[in-house]
Image: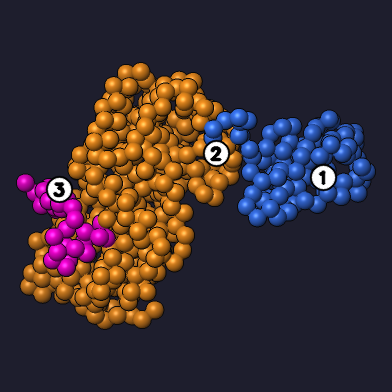
Amino acid sequence: MNKREYADVVVVGGGAIGAAVTCYLARSGMDVALVELGEVPWGSSKRCDGHAVTYDSPPGFFSRFCKMGLDLFPKIIPELPCDIQFEPEGIGLLADDEKDLDTLHQTLEGKRSEGMNVELWDQDELRRHEPHVAPSVVACLNFWGDAKLNPMRLAFGLSRLAEKHGAAIHTRTQARAILKDKDAVCGVETDKGVIRCRRAVLCAGVWTPVIAHTAGVDVPIRPRQGHILVTERVRGLVGKNYAEFGYLAAKGGQKRSGVSRDMEQFGVAMVLEPTSDGTILCGSSRRFVGMDMTPHPAVMRAQAQRILHFFPKFAEARLIRSYAGLRPATPDGKPIISATEVQGLYVAAGHEGNGIGLSLVTGHVVTQMLKGEEPDFDLEHFRLDRFRQ
Amino acid sequence: MKSVFPLQGRQVTIYVDDAPVTAAEGMTVAAAVLGSGVESTRETACRHEARGPFCHMGVCFECLMEIDGKPNQQACLVAVRDGMRVRRQVGAPDFRVDGMAQA
């Protein structure tokens, strides 16, 4: 790898977002260098699941942004040097409470009006497809366009494609400070030397506030911890991705009925992703515990219990691994894709649990923003200064 | 089948893929299976390669077998019991239900 002393743009952070931003910038002909503390990917993009989905946002601009992000995958996949195991097999949202049916119907209509392929299954239809689902589940809302992929392969593939287009990928390199000349970016200081540049894009997820602070910019991102449990390889336990309807409530921090105290406290809601390798990723939880990435037995237990509530047969599968990651959470749950008060300094971070699915569209609109083109999506919603009003 | 190991104490019979195998009480299933001359306890899920007991202490997960109908059991951690039925674990445990639409 050739070490750069100069680049037009330095991207800080080699997760899914940073790799995508680097890739789209390089692909558009710009001279880019990526700086990553570890390998690509590092941080949160290797401690998550691989859902690239629209189901978890209510109809509205954010849902349309997610859809736009999802639609970019089939376009970039033929260019990627590795198989990212992208499978648009859909995700089913399971409801175990008759009271939720009205909301399910509203979501169905709202999402359909946004052009999404959504279908409601009743209990019998669901059981025909998923014999192991608990009898308490009354309906399933399927989002057929939603997908899963391998986030490690995604970030790796994007960084390799970026390299092919001339980007310099500096792994094992720690960004220490944004250097300014008056009020404009003039470089990025790393532990291996300075890379001079006029523009820098911070894609460092939960680590963004630290690096932004060196330029005097306040970025309100907090690390929200989430656990994933991994089953051994199994066949036929579950046919596709599922989440529980309560996931939307847990995501919105609303009170839920029928869950234990631990589940409430840890924000536990069932999310399942059967991977192409045969294991099943089992989520989810959400809590603020600083930068702690250690899986906690009480959270794991609550999460496992929640899975069993919807799929009792999972009791026969062994859990072989668990991990916890830090989702970059903003106060309003939407990402920051924005210029800052420092000229040449941009932020593309804070995607919380949607970073994998939004990686490509973030790379795409950041490229348009840096090239001075009209972005394909109205970025007003994602401005950093919305938190300063 | 007679074990290649000297069998001390009370002897029991287990069935490895339906073939009777003599073992001593207190032995692990992995030891009994190896003693009977069967070296491969499972076939891997992706590449269908043969695997056999390696660490004998519950760490490597290479000795997975179906024991009394339960898939993916670590044969090195389970003691033999008279009449136990043991099968090689072929691929991943299969929970598919016949006649279902599920993939």
Would you say residue A364 sits in the magenta stretch?
Answer: yes
- Residue A334 visible within the image: yes
Q: Which residue is mark 1?
A: B33
Q: Position of residue A120 (x, y in %)?
A: 37, 28
Q: Position of residue A42 (x, y in %)?
A: 39, 60
Q: Which residue is mark 2?
A: B103
How far apart marks 2 and 3 lie (CA) works out to 40 Å
- Of the residues under marks 2 and 1, which one precedes in the sequence? 1
Name above or below for residue A92 compared with residue A330.
above
How far apart marks 3 and 1 lie (CA) works out to 64 Å
Residue at screen point 37% across, 74% down? A164
Q: Colour of chain A?
A: orange
**Amino acid type of the residue that numbered disc 3 sits on in the rendered structure:** His
Q: Are marks 2 and 1 on the same chain?
A: yes
**Amino acid type of the residue that numbered disc 2 sits on in the rendered structure:** Ala
**Label 3 marks which chain's residue?**
A
| Magenta part of the chain | A362-389
